[in-house]
Structure formats: C-alpha cells, structure tokens
Image: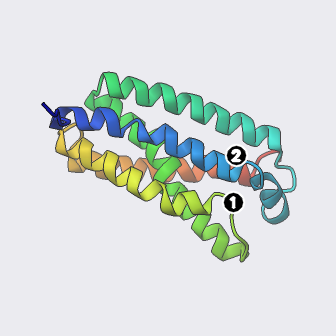
Amino acid sequence: MERSISRSEAFRYSVLLSPLAFTFHVMEEAPYFTNWVKRFINPRFTQSHYLSVHIAGIVIGLVLAGLLSRWPKRWFLFLYLSFFFLPAQFFNIFFHLGATIVYKAYSPGLFTALFLYPPVVLIVLKDALKERLIGRTELICSFFIAGCFHSVEVAHNVFYFGR
C-alpha cells in the first residue's frame, strides 16, 4: 500500500530543503563573490571571511533545520524564520537582484537566489502555515525582523567588513 506524507509530516521534510538550497547557493557564489565584492563594494573583503561566514551558515542551517524537522515548535520556528531562513533565503534574493541592477554587473549568487530560493521559501512557509506552526501575524513580524536583520548582517559582513 502506498503511503503519502501526512499534513503533520510535510513541514518536517520541507524545512530540510533550506540547507540544501543554501549549499547550492554557496556553490554558485563562492568562486566569484569575493572578487565581485572587492571590485564593486569593499576592497577589504576576503575569501577567508566569505568562507567562514558561509561554511558556518551551512553547518548552522543543517543543525537548525534538523532540529526543526525533529521538534517543530512555534517559538523555535519564529526565531528560525526571523534570524536565519528569511534573511538568508528571502531577503538575499533582493540583495543579489539589487546589486546586479545597481552595479550593472551580475552578482554571483543571483541565479540560485532567483530560481532556487523562491520555491523553497514558498514550500516551507506554506507547510508551516498549513500545520499551524506559525500564524499570519507572527509571520509578518518575522518578515519585518528578518529584513532588518539581513540589512545589518549584509552591512556588517560585506559593506563594512575590515573597516
């Protein structure tokens, strides 16, 4: 007999797409991003800084998604969305798109940001809402917090790094 994924199991699987998508994004970005940042934004930016931030992001993403998959708690999901998932995968879309437009040069990472992140974000959020792991008001608040956090994080790690 064929077994389908129940409503309560969907989020447990979909949240695991996040570290996978982030890893693919880093694979696209890593060979070119440092030189791009040095050319257009910050000549002090280094590959070792890029790697330390993004390898930590992959590891933290795996740990957090694994924990949420096993123990999907509302408060934990709110924090995950606000300070990790939405800054890294939703707002990062706007960073790469905006940077490509402003600097008139392809921002390494734009492809995965445009074509991989949107479906992952939609799937994870749809499943979280369906399973009532987060409410609409909490989700709106997490978007606001994530946007602020992403702005500060990018300013610190890209624009003002080494200054």
Q: Is residue 124 above or below residue 67?
A: below
Residue 13: which numbered mark, if any?
A: none
Q: Amino acid at mark 1?
A: Pro
Amino acid residing under circle 2 = Asn
In the image, residue 85 sits, relative to residue 55, either above or below, namely below
Q: Position of residue 12 (x, y in %)?
A: 30, 32
Left or right: 11 in relation to 62: left
Q: Quadrant of the N terminus?
A: top left
In the depicted view, which residue is nearer to us: 5 or 127?
5
The single residue placed furthest to the front in the displayed view is 1
Residue 105: name its quadrant: bottom right
Residue at image location 44% in from the left, 48% down from the top: 86
State the SS at label 1. loop
Q: Earlier in the sequence, mark 1 or mark 2?
A: 1
Q: Position of residue 111 (x, y in %)?
A: 58, 62
What residue sits 17% from the left and 32% below the top? 3
The label number, if any, that marks residue 108 in the structure image? 1
Q: Are marks 1 and 2 in contact (CB under 8 Å)?
A: no
Compared with residue 85, is residue 90 higher up or lower down, i.e. above or below?
below
Q: Which residue is nearer to you in this view: 118 or 42?
A: 118
Badge 1, how many Cα within 10 Å: few under 14, some, many 20+?
A: many
Question: Marks 1 and 2, how far apart in space?
Answer: 16 Å
Q: Residues within 10 Å of mark 2 (few under 14, many from 20)?
A: some
**What residue did someone put label 2 on?**
157
Toward the left, the furthest residue is: 1
- Rendered residue at 70%/69% (across/down): 106
Residue at image position (30%, 48%) is 125
Q: Position of residue 15 (x, y in %)?
A: 37, 37
Q: Position of residue 140 (x, y in %)?
A: 30, 53
Q: Nearer the viewer, mark 1 or mark 2?
A: 1
